[in-house]
Image: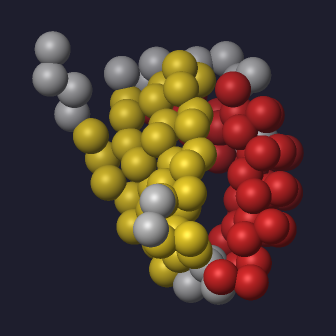
Amino acid sequence: MVSFTVRMQFAEGDREAVEAMLRHLAEGSRQEPGCVNYIAHFVVGEPATVLIYEQYVDEAAVDHHRNTAHFREHAVGGLYRQMLGRLKEDLEAVL
């Protein structure tokens, strides 16, 4: 299992556009084979910060995700162009 979070900061005035891109990205991602969880959040108390929790069955599923049309459109062509900062944290499950 591959799990990680992605934290991104945006300008506060971009919240509505960011939310729309996140909805499209989450909808497409959840339908991918190998996607276990894809949950986007706005961080409470930090209205311009987004945290995405992602979980996939393996690295091949992550690679597939990064090569989908919805990822290219809404992440690379949308979120990445508007974000002011980004931090990815890889996770290790405690079983």
The residue at 65%/85% (across/down) is 11
- Quadrant into which the N terminus falls: top left
Q: Quadrant of residue 92?
A: top left
Where's residue 2, x and y in %? 38, 30
- Quadrant into which the C terminus falls: top left
Tell which of 50 and 86 is nearer to you: 50
Q: Is residue 66 left or right of residue 7?
A: right
Q: Is residue 46 left or right of residue 30?
A: left
Residue 33 sits above or below residue 9 on the image = above
Residue 11 sits above or below residue 44 on the image = below
Q: Residue furthest front?
A: 45
Q: Is residue 13 visible?
A: yes
The residue at 72%/71% (across/down) is 15
Tell which of 88 and 59 is nearer to you: 88
Q: Quadrant of residue 72?
A: bottom right
The residue at 65%/82% (across/down) is 12
Q: Is residue 71 left or right of residue 42?
A: right
Residue 66 sits above or below residue 16 on the image = above
Where's residue 28, x and y in %? 79, 34
Residue 26 sits above or below residue 41 on the image = above
Q: Is residue 60 visible?
A: no
The residue at 32%/54% (across/down) is 89
Where's residue 61, x and y in %? 56, 27
